[in-house]
């Protein structure tokens, strides 16, 4: 935790107690949701490594990939692979990755939930799921509309999360080119 707090740009948190709550305890709040799904996991926009690193440590039999667009953050995350053999890191954007190859995508504080849905769902195989950690202003109706456009649907979700099921293949035209989802959200 000290390394995360000491590395500029990984988190705005400075208090170790608050950092533990936000970076680890909140990440593990979704553990049962992830555990209920099979297959490889991708943490989209890993930043300082949450929720991906706590999930990898808690699920040692599951492959977890941290996908991070910023090189400096990806290099920091790479250090964790020596400690967690089930962990790998990809430096790149979600929009440029191979589609339909993970069973589970997770994201915490990635973007507005409709944008996060558009970035995450194409990465997931049909029958898989996306789990978004969200706040009270998540607007599930907008997320559901965005999910429908990229082959998914909003499933029953516990408070603090939105669970999206991948119900079909990624439609042609998705993912859209980098930056477009944030500039012109689907919903």
Image: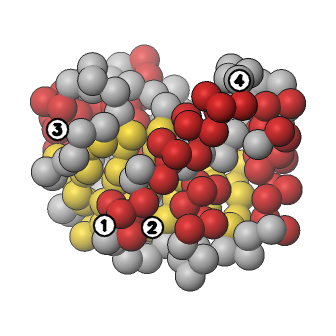
First in sequence: mark 1 or mark 2?
A: 2
Q: Label 1 to label 4, Cα distance in Å?
A: 36 Å
In the image, what residue occupies the spot 30% across and 42% down?
161
Provide the residue designation for mark 1.
Answer: 128
Q: Are marks 2 and 3 in contact (CB under 8 Å)?
A: no
Provide the residue designation for mark 3.
Answer: 144
Q: Label 3 to label 4, Cα distance in Å?
A: 35 Å
For residue 171, above or below residue 56: above
At numbered mark 2, what does the secondary structure look like: helix, strand or loop?
Answer: strand
Q: Are marks 1 and 3 in contact (CB under 8 Å)?
A: no
Looking at the rendered image, the quarter that the N terminus falls into is top right
Residue 102, which numbered label? 2
Q: Are marks 1 and 2 in contact (CB under 8 Å)?
A: yes
Q: Label 1 to label 3, Cα distance in Å?
A: 16 Å
First in sequence: mark 3 or mark 4?
A: 4
Residue 50, which numbered label? none
In the image, what residue occupies the spot 24% across and 39% down?
159
Q: Label 2 to label 3, Cα distance in Å?
A: 20 Å
In front: label 1 or label 4:
4
First in sequence: mark 1 or mark 3?
A: 1
In the image, what residue occupies the spot 39% across and 40% down?
133
Q: Nearer the viewer, residue 122 or 54?
A: 54
Looking at the rendered image, the quarter that the C terminus falls into is top left
In front: label 3 or label 4:
4
Provide the residue designation for mark 4.
Answer: 15
First in sequence: mark 4 or mark 2?
A: 4
First in sequence: mark 2 or mark 3?
A: 2
Q: Position of residue 18 (x, y in %)?
A: 61, 28
Q: Nearer the viewer, residue 57 or 173?
A: 57
At numbered mark 3, what does the secondary structure look like: helix, strand or loop?
Answer: helix
């Amino acid at each position: 935790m000290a390394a995360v707090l000491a590395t500029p740009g990984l988190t705005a948190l400075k208090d170790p107690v608050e950092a533990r709550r936000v970076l680890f305890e909140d990440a593990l709040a979704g553990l049962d949701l992830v555990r209920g799904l099979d297959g490889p996991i991708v943490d989209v926009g890993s930043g300082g490594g949450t929720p991906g690193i706590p999930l990898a440590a808690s699920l040692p039999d599951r492959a977890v990939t941290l996908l991070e667009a910023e090189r400096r953050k990806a290099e920091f995350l790479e250090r964790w692979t020596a400690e967690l053999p089930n962990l790998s890191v990809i430096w790149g954007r979600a929009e440029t990755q191979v589609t339909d190859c993970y069973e589970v995508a997770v994201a915490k504080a990635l973007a507005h939930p409709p944008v996060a849905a558009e970035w995450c769902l194409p990465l997931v195989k049909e029958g898989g799921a996306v789990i978004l950690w969200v706040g009270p202003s998540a607007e599930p109706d907008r997320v559901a509309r965005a999910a429908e456009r990229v082959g998914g649907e909003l499933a029953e979700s516990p408070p603090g999360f939105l669970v999206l099921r991948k119900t079909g293949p990624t439609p042609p035209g998705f993912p859209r080119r980098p930056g477009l989802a944030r500039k012109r959200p689907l919903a």
